[in-house]
Amino acid sequence: MPSTPTVLIIGAGLAGLSCARRLTNAGFTCTVLEASDGIGGRVRTDRIEGFQLDRGFQVFLAGYPEARETLDYSALELMPFHAGALVRHDGRFHVMSDPFRRPQDLPRMLLSPIGSFADKFRMLRMRRDALQQRLCSVMRDAARPTRDVLQTYDFSDAMVRHFFRPFLSGVFLETELNTPCWIFEVVWAAFCRGVTALPRDGMGAIAQQLTATLPPGTIRLNQAVQRIQGSSVVLESGESITADVLVVATDDATAARLRGEDKPIAPARGSVTLYFDASAAPQCGPWLIVNGDGDGVVRTVCVLSEAAPSYAPPGRALISVTATEQTDLQGDISQAVRRQLQSWFGSQVNEWRHLRTDRIQRALPPLDALSSGNPTTSPRLAAGLYLCGDYRESGTLDGALRSGRRAAEAILDDYVQS
């Protein structure tokens, strides 16, 4: 068994890049095979006509613990959103924000019709418990769904219906709030602990930063793997590559296919994002706007250029709209979005120019593919074969980074003599 084996990593998403960087820093030789024409997996940014368009609406939670340890935040030049959201309800916008970071919003929040006074204080209690990692102990079962967490904290039906359900549906990409308590705790604590932001150069800058420390030639693009065959991989081109260690750093469905598993693939959580160019922002300030009424096709609206001016050319505004995929929708989804947003922002919506619609089928892994939250689950599948990816952890960006590091450390444990 070589002391410094050659490592082949399949996938240049955040998990694969995190794994490669950790191993490279330890003196290992890695080759990363990426099927697409660029790095980052689902975390990529395209530049079109001076706009920065992420692959589907995404934000970066600076409060994620693994990200804090892994990334250089100052180099990313994080541009924050306001700590909270605007909720569209009953024809008006209402503020819901973190009073610890935006105390100036407290009077408006307490007087808003989104939940009761008691609901606002319950949020403070849940914030405290999330930051102290006590949510799951309060629930006594880390697998309990998020909706049960909200019920245990005694939030009113109105608070759940007008704020939590639309807000968390946009985060978890599922409307029933089935996401397990342990994942909700990770994400809610990250929201409370640090800013929600965009890197100046787009979400793709995160992958670029991970790649910058890798030796030239480490990543091979447009190298789709057809199958794993023993200690080798066979590319769709027919080329066979052998290494001492294989790391499968893909999504759950691709990982199962490459390993030859013959089982039904659970449907993942998809997203639909529309980008619009406008001459002016329809809402001033770096706010996430959620549809608290739950009607129509629109889930959230965000003027990205209000948070990060670098996302749009000078004098223009970049608007992101996340939408529900409705199979019975008549006509173009962009027209349905415009019709609904006219009631929010008026006739200016007619002047917006539709730039692109991103339909991401596997934006987040299926809930039943996620780790149980057990930190002892090993990335080692067999001798010389390891798995990593967001689905191996919490299904989040932080989970992808953590999974890559854990796979690398398992390899180091196996191949470096103590």
Image (cartoon, rainbow, N blue to C red):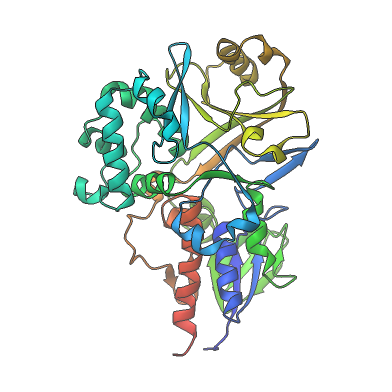
Q: Quadrant of the C terminus?
A: bottom left
Can residue 34 be seen here? The reply is: no
* Residue 330: x %, y % from top left: 59, 13
Compared with 12, 163 (above or below) is above
| Left or right of 50 in this view: 331 | left
Can residue 141 be seen here? The reply is: yes
* Residue 190: x %, y % from top left: 42, 48
- Which residue sits at x=23%, y=36%? 153
| Quarter assignment of residue 49 | top right
| Left or right of 49 in this view: 221 | left
Compared with 257, 314 (above or below) is above
Front residue of 229/403: it is 403
* Residue 12: x %, y % from top left: 62, 59
* Residue 291: x %, y % from top left: 47, 22
Front residue of 116/14: it is 116
- Which residue sits at x=69%, y=52%? 36
- Which residue sits at x=40%, y=45%? 192
Number of numbered markers: 0
- Which residue sits at x=46%, y=38%? 171
| Quarter assignment of residue 315 | top right
Most extreme residue toward the right is 49
Compared with 160, 18 (above or below) is below
Front residue of 294/392: it is 294
